[in-house]
Amino acid sequence: MRYNIRHVTRFTYESPVSESVMEVRMQPRSEGPQRCLEFTLATSPATRVLSYQEHSGNVVHHFDIPGSHSLLTISMEALIDCDAARPLPYRLGPGAWQQIDALTAGGEYWEYLAPSAFAHSTPLLETFRSGLGLERGNDPMVMLRRLMGEMFTRFEYAPQSTRVDSPIDDALKERRGVCQDFSHIFIALVRPLGIPARYVSGYLFRDVSSNDRSSDGATHAWVEVLLPELGWVGFDPTNELIAADRHIRAAVGRDYADVPPTRGVYKGLSTVRNELAVAVRVDSTAATVSTPELVPFIPWKARQGGLTPDEADATAQLRRHQQEQQ
Protein backbone atom coordinates (compact mmCIF):
# COMPACT_ATOMS: atom_id res chain seq x y z
CA MET A 1 0.00 0.00 0.00
CA ARG A 2 1.22 3.50 -0.79
CA TYR A 3 0.37 6.53 1.35
CA ASN A 4 0.75 10.28 0.98
CA ILE A 5 1.09 12.08 4.34
CA ARG A 6 0.74 15.82 4.89
CA HIS A 7 1.45 17.18 8.37
CA VAL A 8 1.16 20.93 9.05
CA THR A 9 1.92 22.55 12.40
CA ARG A 10 1.43 26.23 13.24
CA PHE A 11 2.63 28.06 16.35
CA THR A 12 0.92 31.44 16.85
CA TYR A 13 2.22 33.96 19.40
CA GLU A 14 0.19 36.81 20.93
CA SER A 15 3.17 39.13 20.45
CA PRO A 16 6.24 38.61 18.23
CA VAL A 17 9.10 36.45 19.56
CA SER A 18 12.71 37.13 18.65
CA GLU A 19 13.92 33.57 18.01
CA SER A 20 12.63 30.00 17.70
CA VAL A 21 14.78 26.87 17.95
CA MET A 22 13.03 23.64 16.96
CA GLU A 23 13.53 19.89 16.52
CA VAL A 24 11.16 17.92 14.28
CA ARG A 25 10.61 14.14 14.33
CA MET A 26 8.18 13.59 11.47
CA GLN A 27 10.12 11.73 8.77
CA PRO A 28 8.77 8.17 8.44
CA ARG A 29 11.36 5.45 9.01
CA SER A 30 12.65 3.21 6.21
CA GLU A 31 13.04 -0.29 7.56
CA GLY A 32 11.39 -3.67 7.29
CA PRO A 33 8.16 -3.52 5.29
CA GLN A 34 8.03 0.31 5.33
CA ARG A 35 9.95 2.60 2.98
CA CYS A 36 9.94 6.40 2.84
CA LEU A 37 10.12 7.10 -0.91
CA GLU A 38 9.91 10.90 -0.83
CA PHE A 39 10.10 13.48 1.91
CA THR A 40 9.71 17.27 1.82
CA LEU A 41 9.89 19.87 4.56
CA ALA A 42 9.14 23.60 4.53
CA THR A 43 9.13 26.31 7.19
CA SER A 44 7.65 29.78 7.31
CA PRO A 45 9.56 32.00 7.96
CA ALA A 46 12.10 30.28 5.76
CA THR A 47 15.32 29.09 7.39
CA ARG A 48 18.20 26.66 7.00
CA VAL A 49 17.21 23.13 8.08
CA LEU A 50 19.71 20.47 9.15
CA SER A 51 19.23 16.82 10.07
CA TYR A 52 20.85 13.94 11.92
CA GLN A 53 19.96 10.35 12.86
CA GLU A 54 19.57 9.31 16.48
CA HIS A 55 20.99 6.08 17.89
CA SER A 56 17.48 4.57 17.68
CA GLY A 57 17.26 5.30 13.94
CA ASN A 58 14.91 8.30 14.14
CA VAL A 59 15.67 11.12 11.70
CA VAL A 60 15.64 14.51 13.44
CA HIS A 61 15.42 17.81 11.56
CA HIS A 62 16.35 20.97 13.41
CA PHE A 63 16.47 24.69 12.70
CA ASP A 64 16.83 28.13 14.24
CA ILE A 65 14.73 31.15 13.19
CA PRO A 66 16.56 34.19 14.62
CA GLY A 67 14.31 36.98 13.33
CA SER A 68 11.19 38.46 14.86
CA HIS A 69 8.00 36.51 14.04
CA SER A 70 4.52 35.95 15.44
CA LEU A 71 3.71 32.80 13.42
CA LEU A 72 5.82 29.69 12.81
CA THR A 73 4.58 27.09 10.31
CA ILE A 74 6.17 23.70 9.66
CA SER A 75 4.87 21.61 6.77
CA MET A 76 5.90 18.05 5.97
CA GLU A 77 4.83 15.80 3.13
CA ALA A 78 5.94 12.23 2.54
CA LEU A 79 5.29 9.33 0.21
CA ILE A 80 5.39 5.96 1.98
CA ASP A 81 5.28 2.40 0.66
CA CYS A 82 4.15 -0.31 3.09
CA ASP A 83 4.14 -4.01 2.31
CA ALA A 84 1.30 -6.23 3.49
CA ALA A 85 1.66 -7.35 7.09
CA ARG A 86 2.99 -10.82 7.78
CA PRO A 87 0.62 -13.21 9.58
CA LEU A 88 1.32 -13.55 13.28
CA PRO A 89 0.66 -16.61 15.46
CA TYR A 90 -2.00 -16.41 18.13
CA ARG A 91 0.46 -17.86 20.64
CA LEU A 92 4.23 -18.35 20.76
CA GLY A 93 4.22 -21.79 22.32
CA PRO A 94 6.20 -23.56 25.06
CA GLY A 95 9.45 -21.98 26.18
CA ALA A 96 8.55 -18.48 24.94
CA TRP A 97 9.23 -16.78 28.27
CA GLN A 98 12.64 -18.42 28.47
CA GLN A 99 13.40 -17.21 24.95
CA ILE A 100 12.47 -13.65 25.93
CA ASP A 101 14.78 -13.87 28.95
CA ALA A 102 17.58 -15.06 26.69
CA LEU A 103 16.99 -12.11 24.33
CA THR A 104 17.32 -9.59 27.13
CA ALA A 105 20.07 -11.27 29.18
CA GLY A 106 22.87 -9.28 27.54
CA GLY A 107 21.39 -5.91 28.51
CA GLU A 108 20.98 -4.71 24.92
CA TYR A 109 17.36 -3.70 25.51
CA TRP A 110 17.67 -2.33 29.05
CA GLU A 111 16.23 1.10 28.10
CA TYR A 112 13.01 -0.58 26.95
CA LEU A 113 12.74 -2.57 30.17
CA ALA A 114 13.41 0.21 32.68
CA PRO A 115 10.85 2.75 33.91
CA SER A 116 10.82 6.01 31.94
CA ALA A 117 9.43 9.52 32.29
CA PHE A 118 5.83 8.68 31.35
CA ALA A 119 5.83 4.87 31.65
CA HIS A 120 6.48 3.84 35.24
CA SER A 121 4.72 2.21 38.17
CA THR A 122 2.23 4.10 40.33
CA PRO A 123 -0.23 2.85 42.98
CA LEU A 124 -3.12 3.31 40.53
CA LEU A 125 -1.27 1.31 37.88
CA GLU A 126 -0.58 -1.53 40.31
CA THR A 127 -4.25 -1.59 41.33
CA PHE A 128 -5.19 -1.82 37.66
CA ARG A 129 -2.60 -4.59 37.12
CA SER A 130 -3.97 -6.55 40.05
CA GLY A 131 -7.50 -6.24 38.72
CA LEU A 132 -6.38 -7.65 35.38
CA GLY A 133 -4.49 -10.54 36.98
CA LEU A 134 -1.61 -9.67 34.67
CA GLU A 135 1.30 -12.06 35.13
CA ARG A 136 3.73 -14.30 33.30
CA GLY A 137 1.60 -17.42 33.58
CA ASN A 138 0.09 -17.13 30.10
CA ASP A 139 1.79 -17.40 26.73
CA PRO A 140 3.35 -13.95 26.03
CA MET A 141 1.41 -13.37 22.82
CA VAL A 142 -1.87 -14.48 24.38
CA MET A 143 -1.23 -12.24 27.37
CA LEU A 144 -0.44 -9.21 25.17
CA ARG A 145 -3.54 -9.71 23.05
CA ARG A 146 -5.68 -9.99 26.18
CA LEU A 147 -4.15 -6.85 27.69
CA MET A 148 -4.83 -4.90 24.51
CA GLY A 149 -8.46 -6.07 24.52
CA GLU A 150 -8.94 -5.24 28.20
CA MET A 151 -7.60 -1.71 27.71
CA PHE A 152 -9.80 -1.17 24.68
CA THR A 153 -12.85 -2.23 26.70
CA ARG A 154 -12.06 -0.47 29.97
CA PHE A 155 -10.89 2.92 28.66
CA GLU A 156 -12.86 5.56 26.77
CA TYR A 157 -11.12 7.37 23.93
CA ALA A 158 -11.66 11.07 24.68
CA PRO A 159 -9.72 13.65 22.61
CA GLN A 160 -8.30 16.60 24.56
CA SER A 161 -9.04 14.90 27.89
CA THR A 162 -5.31 14.89 28.73
CA ARG A 163 -2.23 16.97 27.83
CA VAL A 164 1.11 16.00 26.33
CA ASP A 165 2.66 16.04 29.80
CA SER A 166 -0.19 14.27 31.64
CA PRO A 167 0.91 11.39 33.91
CA ILE A 168 -0.69 7.99 33.39
CA ASP A 169 -2.64 8.41 36.63
CA ASP A 170 -4.91 10.97 34.94
CA ALA A 171 -6.12 8.38 32.44
CA LEU A 172 -6.18 5.58 35.02
CA LYS A 173 -8.30 7.64 37.40
CA GLU A 174 -10.85 8.75 34.82
CA ARG A 175 -10.62 5.62 32.62
CA ARG A 176 -10.36 7.88 29.60
CA GLY A 177 -7.61 9.41 27.51
CA VAL A 178 -5.94 9.37 24.10
CA CYS A 179 -3.54 7.09 22.24
CA GLN A 180 -0.53 8.53 24.06
CA ASP A 181 -2.00 7.64 27.47
CA PHE A 182 -3.03 4.13 26.45
CA SER A 183 0.42 3.46 25.01
CA HIS A 184 2.15 4.62 28.20
CA ILE A 185 -0.08 2.45 30.38
CA PHE A 186 0.47 -0.58 28.13
CA ILE A 187 4.26 -0.08 28.26
CA ALA A 188 4.28 0.40 32.04
CA LEU A 189 2.36 -2.86 32.49
CA VAL A 190 4.49 -4.92 30.13
CA ARG A 191 8.05 -3.92 31.01
CA PRO A 192 8.01 -5.33 34.58
CA LEU A 193 7.17 -8.73 33.04
CA GLY A 194 10.55 -8.67 31.28
CA ILE A 195 9.27 -7.87 27.78
CA PRO A 196 11.05 -4.94 26.05
CA ALA A 197 8.44 -2.36 25.05
CA ARG A 198 8.86 0.93 23.19
CA TYR A 199 6.65 3.85 22.22
CA VAL A 200 5.94 4.51 18.53
CA SER A 201 4.97 7.89 17.15
CA GLY A 202 3.50 7.97 13.66
CA TYR A 203 0.37 7.99 11.57
CA LEU A 204 -2.64 5.74 11.02
CA PHE A 205 -4.45 5.44 7.70
CA ARG A 206 -8.20 5.29 8.32
CA ASP A 207 -10.04 3.52 5.52
CA VAL A 208 -13.81 3.53 5.06
CA SER A 209 -14.21 0.04 6.50
CA SER A 210 -12.25 0.66 9.70
CA ASN A 211 -13.79 1.27 13.12
CA ASP A 212 -10.80 3.12 14.53
CA ARG A 213 -11.39 5.22 17.63
CA SER A 214 -8.33 7.44 17.14
CA SER A 215 -8.97 10.92 15.78
CA ASP A 216 -8.72 11.74 12.12
CA GLY A 217 -6.44 14.70 11.39
CA ALA A 218 -3.93 13.92 14.14
CA THR A 219 -0.77 11.94 14.74
CA HIS A 220 -1.04 8.50 16.35
CA ALA A 221 0.86 6.45 18.91
CA TRP A 222 1.09 2.75 19.70
CA VAL A 223 3.48 0.22 21.28
CA GLU A 224 6.04 -2.24 19.95
CA VAL A 225 7.21 -5.22 22.00
CA LEU A 226 10.17 -7.49 21.26
CA LEU A 227 9.19 -11.14 20.82
CA PRO A 228 11.39 -14.15 19.97
CA GLU A 229 11.62 -14.97 16.24
CA LEU A 230 9.11 -12.19 15.42
CA GLY A 231 11.18 -9.12 16.34
CA TRP A 232 9.33 -5.89 17.17
CA VAL A 233 5.56 -6.41 17.01
CA GLY A 234 3.17 -3.45 17.19
CA PHE A 235 0.13 -3.37 19.50
CA ASP A 236 -2.39 -0.53 19.21
CA PRO A 237 -4.47 -0.50 22.42
CA THR A 238 -6.43 2.56 21.28
CA ASN A 239 -8.01 0.60 18.43
CA GLU A 240 -7.40 -3.01 19.56
CA LEU A 241 -5.24 -3.69 16.52
CA ILE A 242 -2.03 -5.52 15.82
CA ALA A 243 -0.05 -2.84 13.94
CA ALA A 244 0.05 -3.63 10.24
CA ASP A 245 0.38 -1.80 6.93
CA ARG A 246 -2.05 0.98 7.99
CA HIS A 247 0.34 2.00 10.78
CA ILE A 248 3.11 4.31 9.49
CA ARG A 249 6.07 4.58 11.87
CA ALA A 250 7.89 7.90 12.26
CA ALA A 251 9.92 7.54 15.48
CA VAL A 252 10.48 5.12 18.37
CA GLY A 253 11.60 5.78 21.93
CA ARG A 254 11.11 4.90 25.57
CA ASP A 255 7.94 7.02 25.72
CA TYR A 256 6.50 10.26 24.33
CA ALA A 257 9.25 12.34 25.95
CA ASP A 258 11.75 10.85 23.46
CA VAL A 259 9.75 11.37 20.26
CA PRO A 260 7.39 14.39 20.17
CA PRO A 261 6.78 15.46 16.54
CA THR A 262 8.00 18.96 17.47
CA ARG A 263 10.04 20.23 20.40
CA GLY A 264 11.65 23.60 20.88
CA VAL A 265 12.08 26.85 22.76
CA TYR A 266 11.61 30.52 21.90
CA LYS A 267 12.77 33.90 23.12
CA GLY A 268 10.32 36.72 23.60
CA LEU A 269 7.93 38.60 25.86
CA SER A 270 4.82 36.78 24.72
CA THR A 271 3.21 35.79 28.01
CA VAL A 272 -0.47 35.79 27.07
CA ARG A 273 -2.08 33.38 24.60
CA ASN A 274 0.05 31.10 22.46
CA GLU A 275 -1.65 28.55 20.21
CA LEU A 276 -0.58 25.28 18.62
CA ALA A 277 -2.62 24.13 15.62
CA VAL A 278 -2.01 20.74 13.99
CA ALA A 279 -3.47 19.20 10.85
CA VAL A 280 -2.59 15.74 9.53
CA ARG A 281 -3.87 14.02 6.39
CA VAL A 282 -3.03 10.44 5.38
CA ASP A 283 -4.27 9.33 1.95
CA SER A 284 -3.90 6.08 0.11
CA THR A 285 -2.51 7.00 -3.29
CA ALA A 286 -0.17 5.83 -6.03
CA ALA A 287 0.70 9.41 -6.96
CA THR A 288 3.97 11.10 -6.15
CA VAL A 289 4.32 14.07 -3.83
CA SER A 290 3.50 17.11 -5.92
CA THR A 291 2.35 19.89 -3.60
CA PRO A 292 3.56 23.05 -5.41
CA GLU A 293 4.70 25.04 -2.38
CA LEU A 294 7.10 22.29 -1.24
CA VAL A 295 10.46 21.40 -2.76
CA PRO A 296 12.32 18.08 -2.27
CA PHE A 297 13.98 18.21 1.13
CA ILE A 298 17.67 19.14 1.21
CA PRO A 299 19.27 19.47 4.68
CA TRP A 300 20.65 22.96 4.00
CA LYS A 301 17.68 24.33 2.07
CA ALA A 302 14.14 25.37 2.96
CA ARG A 303 11.65 27.77 1.48
CA GLN A 304 8.60 29.68 2.59
CA GLY A 305 5.26 28.31 1.56
CA GLY A 306 1.69 29.53 1.66
CA LEU A 307 0.50 26.91 4.13
CA THR A 308 -3.15 27.00 5.16
CA PRO A 309 -4.34 23.53 6.23
CA ASP A 310 -7.97 22.78 5.49
CA GLU A 311 -8.08 19.87 7.91
CA ALA A 312 -9.56 20.16 11.38
CA ASP A 313 -7.19 21.83 13.84
CA ALA A 314 -6.44 20.59 17.34
CA THR A 315 -5.42 23.39 19.70
CA ALA A 316 -3.57 23.36 23.00
CA GLN A 317 -1.90 25.89 25.28
CA LEU A 318 1.88 26.24 25.01
CA ARG A 319 4.33 27.09 27.75
CA ARG A 320 6.39 30.25 27.13
CA HIS A 321 9.73 28.46 26.87
CA GLN A 322 8.65 25.18 25.29
CA GLN A 323 6.95 24.27 22.03
CA GLU A 324 5.82 20.66 21.95
CA GLN A 325 3.20 18.93 19.87
CA GLN A 326 0.88 16.10 20.81
Image: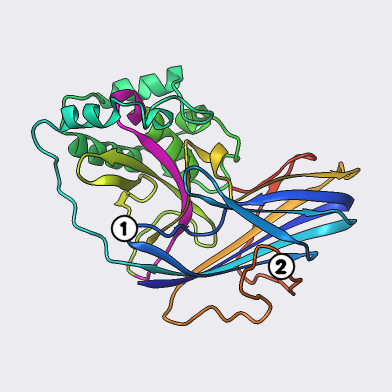
| Residue visible at 48% across and 38% down in the picture | 181
Residue 64 lies, with reference to residue 295, above or below; the image says above
Distance in Å between CA atoms under marks 2 and 1: 34 Å
Q: Are marks 2 and 1 in contact (CB under 8 Å)?
A: no
Which residue is labeled 2 in the image? 301
| Residue visible at 50% across and 42% down in the picture | 55
Q: Is residue 303 magenta?
A: no
Mark number displayed over residue 291: none
Q: Is residue 202 magenta?
A: yes
Q: Quadrant of the N terminus?
A: bottom left
Mark earlier in primary sequence (2, 1): 1
Closer to the camera in the image, 150 or 121: 121
In the displayed image of the protein, which residue is found farthest to the left? 94
- Asked which quadrant contains residue 163, the reply is top right
Say if residue 169 shows up in the picture.
Answer: yes
- Asked which quadrant contains residue 182, the reply is top left
Residue 77 lies, with reference to residue 162, above or below; the image says below
* Coloring applied to the structure: rainbow
Residue 186 position within the rendered picture, expressed as x and y whole percent measured from the top left = 38, 35
**Left or right placement of residue 268 versus residue 63 in this view:** right
Residue type beneath disc 2: Lys
Q: Secondary structure at mark 1?
A: loop
Residue 28 position within the rendered picture, expressed as x and y whole percent measured from the top left = 48, 59
Mark 1, Cα crowd under 10 Å, few <14 / some 14-19 / many 20+, is some
Residue 17 position within the rendered picture, expressed as x and y whole percent measured from the top left = 88, 50
Residue 54 position within the rendered picture, expressed as x and y whole percent measured from the top left = 54, 45
Which residue is labeled 1 in the image? 244
Residue 122 lies, with reference to residue 96, above or below; the image says above
Residue type beneath disc 1: Ala
Residues drawn in magenta: 190-208
Task: Give the mark count.
Answer: 2
